[in-house]
Amino acid sequence: MDQSNYTSLHGFILLGFSDHPKLEVVLSGVVTIFYLITLVGNTAIILASLLDSRLHTPMYFFLRNLSLLDLCFTTSIIPQMMVNLWGPDKTISYVGCVIQLYVYMWLGSIECLLLAVMSYDRFTAICKPLHYLIIMNPHLCLKMILMVWSISLANSVVLCTLTLNLPRCGNKLLDHFLCELPAMVKIACIDTTTVEMSVFALGIVIVLTPLSLILISYGYIAKAVLRMKSKAGQRKAINTCGSHLTVVSIFYGTIIYMYLQPGNSASKDQGKFLTLFYTIVTPSLNPLIYTLRNKDMKDALKKMVRNQLI
C-alpha cells in the first residue's frame, strides 16, 4: 500500500498526553467535571434568558449566542478526547479529524468576532442609552450574528483547506489531543512558510482586529462612565461591562499567547495545556462569570428553578 495514502484511509494517531499515563487519568476526571459545568451552565443561561421576558434584550440575545457557541465548541472536541484519554485507542478517523479541524477553527473564530459585537452592544447601551433600542434593533442584531458566523466560516474554509492540501508523506502522528491547525501543519513534509504566513495574516484579522474594536469601545465606555454623576449608574455600568471584560481578558489572553507568538517559543506540553484551558476551562467559566455578576440573570435562574420544583 502507498504510504502517502495511509492517513486518508486510516486517519491519525493523537499522541496527546500519552507519554504521561498518570496525568491522563487525572485529566479525564478534570475534563469530565468541566464539561458537565459547561453543559449545565450554558444550557441554564439559554433557557433562563428565553423563558424570562425581561431578558429579551440585545445583550442577552448575544449572551445566548455565546452560550450556544460554547456548547457546540466543547462538544466538538471533548467526546473524542475522552475516548482517547480513557483507553489505549488514540486514533481518530481521517473524516473525523477533518470535521473537527473545520469546526474547531470555525467556532473559535466566531467567539473572537462575537465578543467584539458584544462590546459594541455595551458601548451603545452606555454611550447612547436614549437611542439604544432603536440602534440595536432585532433586525440589526440578527444581521450582526449572521455576519459573524459567515466571516468565521470563510476563515475556517480557507485556512483548513490550505492545511489539508499539504502533503504529509504518510505522517500520521499528531502531537496533540485534537486535530488542531498548527499540529496538522507540523506533520507536513514540505516547507510550510506560505501556509504559516497565511495563518498569521488571517490571525491578525480575526483576532487582533476585533480586539482593537473592543479596546476602542471600552475607551469610549470609560469616558462615559467617568462623566456619570450618579454613583449607582456608574456601578451598574461597571457591573454590566465587568463580566464581558473578564471573558475578553481570559479568551484573548490565551489565544494571543497560543497563536501570535514565534513557533518555537513555547514547549509542546505548554501549548497543549493552553489549548486545554482555552477549549475546556474557558467555556465553563463564561456562565459562572455572567451569572455571578448579573442580578437579572440570577433572578431569572432562581425563577426557572422554582417553576421546575413547583
Image (cartoon, rainbow, N blue to C red):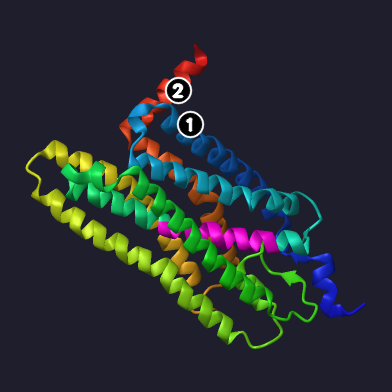
The secondary element bearing badge 1 is classed as helix
**Where is residue 255 drawn, in percent x and y?**
46, 64
For the stretch drawn in magenta, the main secondary structure is helix
The quarter of the picture where the N terminus appears is bottom right
**Residue at left offset 45%, top offset 23%:** 304
Give the residue pinned by disc 2: 304
Report x, y in % for residue 308. Answer: 51, 18
Cβ–Cβ below 8 Å for labels 1 and 2? yes
- Specify the quadrant of the image occupied by residue 299: top left
Vertical relation: 256 (above or below) 111: below
Q: Which residues are magenta?
A: 98-113
Name the amino acid type tagged 1.
Answer: Leu
Q: Is residue 177 above or below residue 240?
A: below
Amino acid on which the number 2 mark rests in the picture? Met
Q: From where the camera sits, is residue 217 visible?
A: yes
Label 1, on which residue?
47
Residue ID at (54%, 35%) = 40
Q: Position of residue 11 (x, y in %)?
A: 79, 65
Secondary structure, mark 2, is helix
Is residue 100 rendered magenta in the image? yes
